Image: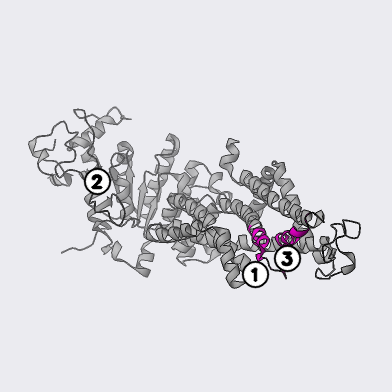
Amino acid sequence: MRILAPLLEVRAVKKYYPLGRGLLSISKRAVHAVDGVSLRLETGTTLGLVGESGSGKTTLGRIIVGLIHPTEGSVMFEGQEIFSLRGKEQFSLRTKMQIIFQNPEASLNPRKTVRHVLTQPFLLHRLATRSEADERAYHLLEQVKLTPPELYLDRYPHQLSGGQKQRVAIARAIALGPKLVVADEPVSSLDMSVKASVLKLMNEIQSNLGLSYFLISHDLYMTRSISKIVAVMYAGRIVELAETDELFRHPAHPYTQALLASTPVPDPAIARGVSRNVIGEPFSPIDPPDYCRFSSRCPYKQDKCLQRSPQLEEIRKDHWVECFFPL
Amino acid sequence: MRATNWPARIRQFWVRFSKNHAAVAGLVIVAALVAVSAGANLIRANDIFNINPGQTFESPSWSHPFGTDNLGRDMFSLFLYAGRVSFEVGFTAAAVSVLLGTLLGSIAGFYGGVVDDVIMRFTEMFLAIPILLLGLTILIIYGPGLSHVVFVIAVLSWPVTARLVRAEFLTLKEREFVEGLRAVGAPNHVIIFNEIMPNALIPVIINASLQVGAAITVEAGLSFLGLGDPSNPSWGYLLQQAQTFLTRAWWIATFPGIGLLLAILSLSLIGDGLNDALNPRLAEKG
């Protein structure tokens, strides 16, 4: 018997983008952006999703906040299937989950002031009058450390720096008190010092508001510093999932190992596992093979890997790997 | 804030616009022509339909600066009143066509898919129709009249704006701020009209100034072909009437012709100037 549904539960989600459009197109070829992903996320925790570009992590993030409809599978938020919601319920769901984008240049409307951006959520949801919304916008700016707020309220995005824009984007995301924020590479376009301060801010906000982050990144070490659980995505599938320390200490999937080995280590004390280099190219995401997707690059592959596709299996407690021969 | 920001933007716009001297000249000429046409009844109160058999074909003089026509009417008065008609048609037709084109183009670009296909096929259908031919047909069936002329021009020129606005929307809707708006639950009409539209307006404004000139040209063409409204003569109508007297009284055709030429040329210069002033991408290169 289930006592409490997790905050977020992703069930066997797939997203295929069919190729070729037109009345007479009978082609069944499709790009498999996300190909059968299941995940859970509890309240107040951070799940870091890492993977190379093209692995489908951005698509997965968009599906989780309901911006993209999956081809198959379901996303349960507080026990409710989000894509089955209609009308009012769907609208009020928008107050509970939010998203922060990678590129702060594009994530704010160049023609709208900070005031507009931060009051709009309240006005749309009729949660405040205009003057109340103004006041809330003021407090939001304080929360994201853009002080004094009156200095920023009436600025346009082009009058803000990249870090300031990202803070405004964070303020908009937390405006309605969401329980889940999907952050898609929130700091990767910022420079080093700004990166650190924005991450610190996100941490603070999490402890103040008790929200969960679904943090998408290609940077393993950044993910490590902020996540409780890390999922590694490769070619549309989760290939390894474990608590952060466990994953970094005992990476079991050849891809995770290669990823760790190829990332520059800021802390030399971290021991690197012995790993053979990853060679070759990933399979095309168009109709990928029905056997192991990493086999084209795996230095450890065996015959079995070219016959069937492995499934996520728990090799240790709470450590899941999708590999026939975990390391 | 908006109050303090707008003047700064307008000043910046004016600084850029005024660098283009031809555009400023165009603006002055159009402003002058519009002003004298609008104030026609203040400048010349004489009834333009007043026939004076005693003073036909008088060459330009102090009392008749633009001469008189075959019926002895004052060509200067006719010029002013006809200018008013030309501008009225030009501005209303352009306004209707820009509004229609903006609306359809934004919807096509934003929704994409089947909606886009339907609207754009429809647009292409209108683009494929020769404008004068359909104009002639409609005016022959429904008879001359300013509103018919405005309708014809507007209906036939909106596709240009529609395609322009659609193209803007196609790129703008992919920007992340649109997803951000969806994430907070902004409905489509808010996203289209309040959020994306302000970003798409610059090419529309530039295009609108060109549309006015084009509308005046088409109106003149239709009038010249004899489909003008005799009770509301425009510059094109005056030209058509003047045909028979070209060798006998040069002034009857010359002044309306100059009026048309100046108006159309100036409007297109203004369009160029707006383009330079409002299009930072081009301005940076040049």
Q: Which mark is residue A279?
A: none
Chain of the residue where label 2 is placed in the rendered structure: A
Question: Magenta part of the protein: which range?
Answer: B218-246
Q: Is residue B169 shown above or below A52?
A: below
Q: Residue at x 11, y 39 (%)?
A: A306
Residue at image point 70% right, 59% down: B236
Identify residue for label 1: B144
Residue located beneath label 2 in the image: A236
Prevalent SS, magenta region: helix
For the point 49% across and 66% down, the residue is A128
- Kindly state the secondary structure of the residue where label 3 is placed: loop
**What amino acid is at disc 1?**
Pro
Sequence-first tag of 1 and 3: 1
| Separation (CA) of disc 2 from disc 3 | 70 Å
Q: Pointer 3: what residue?
A: B233
Residue at x 35%, y 65% (from the top left corner): A90
Q: Residue furthest right?
A: B62
On the same chain, marks 2 and 3? The answer is no
Based on the picture, tell me whether residue B235 belongs to the magenta stretch. Answer: yes
Q: Nearer the viewer, mark 1 or mark 2?
A: 1
Please provide percent x and percent y for residue A325. 11, 38
The residues tagged by marks 1 and 2 sit, at their Cα atoms, a distance apart of 65 Å
